[in-house]
Amino acid sequence: MLCCVKEKIGEAVLPGDLLAFEIQKSENKREKLICGPGLRRDGEDVFVCKSGILRHKEPNLYWIDLQQRRYVPAKGESVIGIVTAKSGDVFKVDVGGSEQASLSYLAFEGATKRNRPNVQVGDLVYAQFIIANKDMEPELVCIDSCGRANGMGVFGAGGLLFKVSLGLVRKLLSPQSEIVKDLEKIFPFEMVIGLNGRIWVKAKTTQQTLIVANILESCENMTTEQRRSIFGRVSENVL
Amino acid sequence: MQRGLDAETRKQLEEEEKRIISDEHWYLDLPELKEKENFIIEERSFLPCEDLLYGRMSFKGFNPEVEKLMTLMNSQNRTEDVEEEVQNKTGVDVSDEEMARRYESLVGSIKRKFTKKRNRPAIQGEDNVNSNIRSPKIKKVFLKPQD
């Protein structure tokens, strides 16, 4: 169904909708248009391939705000992975996608052939994708382009790892996240959020860790008032 | 006595060989296809769409290293904020203006050190504009004694 893009921003769209853009064909034919996740290009047209709400960001970025639990690896995203196997020079890491990602042992800060990183099977790693497309095996690294770790690598002794939907993860990581603002007032804790839907939490006691984990898992479907009331009760009980 | 071939016949033979070889090569007899300039780019990741923050977080001082990382990485994302300017100034020991002043005097003193004694009044003349020193263009040249 053909529809104009300007009307549909902020509205729900269904897979199969065709979006029409006002293309200036006179001078600026080079105006780039970026279609984000949920949109697909077919020749000169843009189709919607996932249902959700159409969003727009200046100047020319469009994407679909969708809900899903299954993660598909994308380049540049930081995820939490679990090391499942060590084969030669490469670690196999489970990121929740359709296949396991590979992580080279040289992709850690300060790692050389003689100086191997201390990674065991079952460790949690916070890493970034450098290769992630449908044709190749995904590859992870724990350093950035300058060679610094920037907090990536093996983390966490203790704590709890659990899985949430991808929409919640994006809500938590958005710049003005209310959930995070409410959470940070309760008690000191530490959290690592992977874009593959995995969150790791660690607090001083096991009970506090479990409280935070339960709040995060359940606050996706709550309204703001419900969430505030739960936070209020928790902070009363803790103090 | 000529055993070998002439240069001309050799050239002709080579050309014939090349022609035979290139005829055997296969090529596509298609019209030239012009690559369409696509101005629609597909982007698979959510990162540029929503400006997501750094994934490791620590609150109330639970893990000070992670808190330092948080401020570092989140300020890298926001390059237009004023906060970054403040951070730059606090992280640096010497401010930019003081550095410029120091450099000014440093350059002058090093220059003075390496000039010959003859040229030193000229350098000092640059510093004091009002002083009466003869112009540096008049150089002392050896005058030949007249017989």
Image: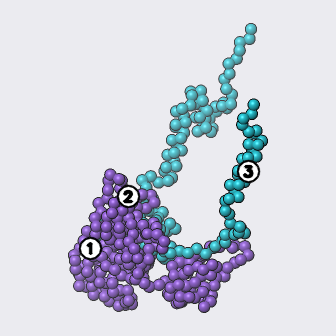
Judged by depth in the image, the label closer to the viewer, 1 or 2, is 2
Chain drawn in purple: A
Can residue A31 be spotted in the picture? yes
Name which residue lies at 47% across and 54% down: B95
Question: Front-most of B135 and A76?
Answer: A76
- Residue A203 falls in image quadrant: bottom left
Residue A106 — which label?
2
Which colour scheme appears in the figure? Answer: by chain
Judged by depth in the image, the label closer to the viewer, 3 or 1, is 3
Name which residue lies at 77% across and 41% down: B8
The answer to whether residue B136 is above or below residue A170 is above
- Residue A77 falls in image quadrant: bottom left
Question: Which amino acid, by three-letter code, is at mark 1?
Answer: Gly
Q: Position of residue A53 (x, y in %)?
A: 51, 87
Mark 1 burial class by Cα count in 10 Å: few <14, some 14-19, many 20+? some
Which residue in the structure is indicated by mark 1? A159
Residue B16 — which label?
3
The answer to whether residue A111 is above or below residue A184 is above
Total of numbered circles in the picture? Answer: 3
Whole-angstrom CA distance, mark 3 to mark 2, is 56 Å
- Residue B28 falls in image quadrant: bottom right
Element on which disc 3 rests:
helix
- Determine the colour of chain B: cyan
